[in-house]
Structure formats: structure tokens, C-alpha cells
Amino acid sequence: MDERFDAIVVGSGPAGTTAALCMAREGLKVIVLERGEYPGSKNLFGGVMYTAILGKLVPKFWNEAPVERYVAKRRFNLLSETSSVSFEFSTKDFSDPPHNNSFIALRARFDRWYAQKAAEAGALLVPETDVIDVIRKDGKVVGVRTQRSEGDIYADVVIAADGANSLVAKKAGLRSDFSSDRFTTGIKEIIELPKEVISQRFGLEGNEGAAVTFGGYPSGILCGGFIYTNKDSLSVGVTTYLHSLVENKMQVSDLLETFKKHPMVKPLIEGGRAREYGAHLIPEAAYKGKMCDDGILVIGDAASLLNPSPIFLEGTNLAMASGMYAAQTIKAAKEKGDFSRRSLDLYPQLLEKSFVMQDVTKYGKIPEFVTKNPQFLTDYPDLLCQSAKELFTLDERPKAEKKALVRKIMTQNSSSLKVARDLYKAYRNLL
Amino acid sequence: MNIEDKLLLIRFNSDQSAHIKLNKDLCVDCEERGCLYVCPVNAYQIEGNEMTFDWSACLECGACRIVCSRGALNWEYPRGGFGVCFRYG
Ligand SMILES: Cc1cc2nc3c(=O)[nH]c(=O)nc-3n(C[C@H](O)[C@H](O)[C@H](O)COP(=O)(O)OP(=O)(O)OC[C@H]3O[C@@H](n4cnc5c(N)ncnc54)[C@H](O)[C@@H]3O)c2cc1C
Ligand code: SF4
Ligand code: SF4
């Protein structure tokens, strides 16, 4: 390709599309390269699309975007083999747009729609194009190599928005932090059920949706389960640390099947028809690489900009925010005519000032914490279920005796002090 | 539901050549064999003493790439437009 661009964006997930949209609106000449047949065709998440930033970029997007339901209910379940202790938050306070900026979505549909917005703003969107390397000149990144014939493309700056596996950031020498203790894998099924059945089972009205997460089962594995209600299907899956699968010699597809058979999960998905099966990595640990270098920036999952807290699990909003800050940085660099590392350093500075780095810094140590303190996922859910069962078992014992028993169950393997300390630790590190 | 049935649900645009290349020699004395557990489509199998690998139903997740610490995998994405194509995602 002889044409030159101001910027090349690799990948059209939420991060890349946001960067492309913002740059195109500033009048920059932008090309977006996406390896999938269409944007979204390679992408998969839980999940909830967090849209605080999208709402600013595309006002009233909910009238046109293919979102499924808004989140009106969240339920966290701690499981033992046969029981569950849950915490639920339900509200009618989010029933008006923008619905608390939390929409359950399916990525093959959502990402395709969103990428079209960038194209409408003037970005050139080229799918079916895999970027295989960056091109350097005098040490600076000046373009990318694709597998197409005459597939070298040149620009002032390249944005690596290529997701968790980021081969682009790796090949550009910006990161090498790919180890199995830093990633979880998510595998998921789409299970079709009639809309009314879903609303009834999860206690929802109209386009209300539920985000339901699970921990503690199967025990011994560092994993969690999820169910998100789409309009007429459920997104059902598990996420788990790669090293935990290997240590337990547990096949990840068996893990999902085991989860689906849990007595508290089975009735929720009963009678549904599986429509799709997929998998994707989650970059849980805080990034150790470089955010930018001469002629290149890394955004979204490619720079592990994700909040992996089991309570929140947010990636889409951090991806969009980083795309927006990258676009601002490039606009400023263009005005100065300087795309050196020093000039692009504005990007990490903008990230630092925003919720993105503040959340990543706070929660990016979760993988280490969970691995060092497996009891939170492997022991406590079961102990809580046992305690609740004891408390609610009706017999002729006085309640005071039960309270003492609960205390005994909770401190089985340790002292009350240790449990109190653990609870405080969980509060500090996971919430 | 077994994996074979699940694979029927996924749309693939299959390419002729492998995007992931496995150097089986390095697997011979690998003790961990992490690839066996993390692959969602069981692309890695042990037959007798030998590791077999079928890339054709790969979901391109990258879990095997991260977990193999012996450098036995030359891991790339399929050519543009090929490979898995999610309809829901
Ligand atoms: C199981 C699971 C559950 C999740 N749940 C949630 C949730 O509920 N809420 C939430 O906010 N986040 C969730 N996340 C995280 C969220 O999905 C990510 O943070 C988000 O998708 C990151 O966006 P991105 O644009 O950086 O990367 P991606 O969405 O991964 O996009 C990367 C894009 O780059 C393309 N690409 C890759 N390599 C190349 C190449 N070489 N050439 C050309 N194109 C390329 C890909 O095809 C893709 O389109 C979840 C993730 C998983 C896996
Ligand atoms: S982990 Fe790597 S070296 Fe070990 S068996 Fe699997 S592919 Fe071979
Ligand atoms: S990339 Fe994922 S699906 Fe493909 S072979 Fe590796 S683990 Fe299996």
C-alpha cells in the first residue's frame, strides 16, 4: 500500500475502535486492521459492557447499539457441593437510560456495530487482515507488516490494540510478561432460552438483566463461574487461573461441565439449547511492559488494562478510556510533529491521572494475592455454607449453641484471629 | 455435552496450513504437559507416548502459548479472515 496514514490501529475491539473513532473525529487519517472476518468475530467476554465513556462519544447509543439487557441485578454466590450463600443487589433505580452504563452484550454483535461508528467518522476499516510484525526504521516504529500482498503499511504512529495475547506489543519489544500466573482463561457457552423463561427464572421485568457470579466450586481450583442474561439466551461460563488447571490436572472443558451441573446452577440453565462455545484469555496481572515507545502505543487488554476484581471484572471501560487517551496523545503529537517516546509519554500520564491506572494499580495484584491465599476461593465458600446450614438447621438446640458451632466451623483450620485477619485482607485486596 | 458436539456449534473458516506449529521433540520429557489441561477444545492429546496436536478446531485463545514453558510452540494467529468466527462471542 503506497498510501500513508497518520495512525494505524491494530485490532477493532473496544480499545482500538475508540482510538480510531476519536482520531477520525479529529480529522486524522486512520486505518484499522482487524484479523477477523468482521470486528467482533474473534472476541468473547462475560459479560457486561461498561459504557460511561461510550455514552460521551456516542450519545444515546442504547437506541441503536446491539445491547441485550441492562444490569438491574447482581448476585454473588459462594458455593459448596450442595449449598449456596448469596449476596444480591437489585434495584429499580437504573431503569432509565443510561441504565447505570452497564449493559449485557454479545461481542460479535456489539464490536461490529461499534467499529462501524469509527468507519462512519472516517476511519478506514480493513477486516481479514492479520498484522504479523511492526516495521522499524532507525529504531522507530514506522508501520506494520500484514500477510496481504503489498501488505506493508506506513504511518506516523501504530496503536497496538490487539488484545490479551498482544503479539504486536511483543514483537515490537514492549512486553514479555506472558506467564501462566498472570492470566486466567474464560470459557463460555451461549445457551438459548425463551425471553419470558429467562425473566421468570432470574426475577426480571422488561429489559432488566442479571449478572450472576459464583465462587468456591469445584473446590480446590482457583476459579469462578458466571451467568449473564441476554435477551433470549444466557452467557454461561467459568474463568480460571491457567496454573491452577495445570496443578490440579483439571481439563478446562470438564471444569465448565462440572460447574453447569452444580445444583444451584443447573435449574437456571435447564432446558436451554447450546448455540455457541468459545474461549478467551483475561490479562489479570498489572502490566510489566512499556506503554509506549518511539512511534507506538499499547492500549486495552494488550497493556493488561483490566480490573480483575471478582466483584467488578471490568475491562471494556478501561479499554475505551485508554483508546481515548491514546487518541488525545496522538493529536497532541501530530500538532508538535513529534512521535518520539518522549512526546507519546503523555499517554501513560493521562492514564495515571484517570481511574484506569488507579484501579489497575489497586487490583492488579489480585492474581498474586489469590495464588498466595487460595483459602478465599477454596475454603471459605464451603465454610460459609456449612455455617449457614448449621445456623438454619431446625432442632431443639438453643440458638446460642449454634452460634458457638458456627464460630467453630469458621475457625476449623485456624484461630478466630486468623479468620478476622483473613476477612480484613479480603476486604482490602478484593473489594 | 462433549467437546465433539460443542465443536459443531462453532463456525470455522478453515485454512489449509497450521497457524500453530508444535515441536514434539520438546514434549517427550515435558512433565507438566499443561497444554493438555488448558486447551478448551482438547487439541492436545497423548497417544501412546506421543503428543498429538490438531489445530483445526483451535479457538485462538492463546492458553497453550502461555502455559508451555518449554518453547515447543511456534504460535501465530491464522491468516486474516481464517479460523474461528464467533456469531455471539
Ligand atoms: C471470559 C471473559 C469475561 C469478561 N467479562 C467482562 C465483563 O463482564 N465486563 C468487562 O468490562 N470486561 C470483561 N472482560 C474483559 C474484556 O473483554 C476486555 O477487557 C476487552 O475486550 C478489551 O478490549 P480490547 O479492545 O483491548 O481487546 P479485544 O476486545 O480482545 O480486541 C482485540 C482485537 O484485536 C484483533 N487482533 C488481535 N491480533 C491482531 C492482529 N495481529 N492483527 C489484526 N487484528 C488483531 C482481535 O481480533 C480483536 O478484534 C472479560 C473477558 C473475558 C475473556
Ligand atoms: S506443555 Fe509444551 S512441551 Fe509440554 S507437552 Fe505441552 S506443548 Fe509439549
Ligand atoms: S490457542 Fe487455545 S484453542 Fe488453540 S490450541 Fe491453544 S489452547 Fe487450544
Image (cartoon, rainbow, N blue to C red):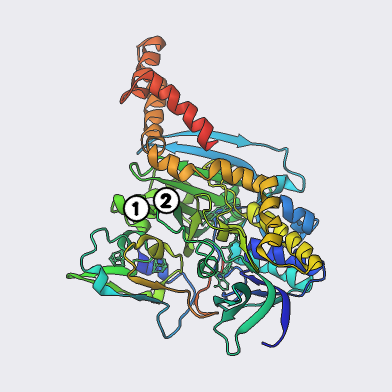
Q: Position of residue A45 (x, y in %)?
A: 55, 57
Q: In the rendering, which numbered label is found on residue A240?
A: 2
- The kind of residue tagged 2 is Thr
Q: Position of residue A384 (x, y in %)?
A: 41, 29
Q: From the viewer's side, name the closer residue of A173 and A164.
A: A173
The answer to whether residue A128 of the structure is visible from this angle is: no
Residue in the image at 48% along x and 42% along y: A366
- Taking the image as shown, residue A334 lies to the left or right of residue A112, namely right
User: Is mark 2 in CB contact (under 8 Å) with mark 1?
Assistant: yes
Q: In the rendering, which numbered label is found on residue A245?
A: 1
**Residues at marks 2 and 1, common chain?**
yes
Q: Chain of mark 1?
A: A
In the rendered view, tell whether residue A89 sits above or below residue A176. Answer: above
Cα–Cα gap, marks 2 and 1? 7 Å
The answer to whether residue A333 of the structure is visible from this angle is: yes
Sequence-wise, the earlier of marks 2 and 1 is: 2
- Taking the image as shown, residue A216 lies to the left or right of residue A147, namely left
Residue in the image at 36% along x and 34% along y: A379
Q: Position of residue A94 (x, y in %)?
A: 72, 41
Residue in the image at 79% along x and 71% along y: A28
Q: Quadrant of ligand 3?
A: bottom left
Residue sitting farthest toward the left? B48
| Dot 1 alpha-carbon crowd within 10 angstroms: few under 14, some 14 to 19, many 20 or more | many
**What SS does tag 2 mark?**
strand
Q: Quadrant of residue A154?
A: bottom right
| Dot 2 alpha-carbon crowd within 10 angstroms: few under 14, some 14 to 19, many 20 or more | many
Q: Quadrant of the N terminus of chain A?
A: bottom right
Q: Position of residue A279 (x, y in %)?
A: 46, 62
In the rendered view, tell whether residue A127 sits above or below residue A315. Answer: below
- The kind of residue tagged 1 is Leu
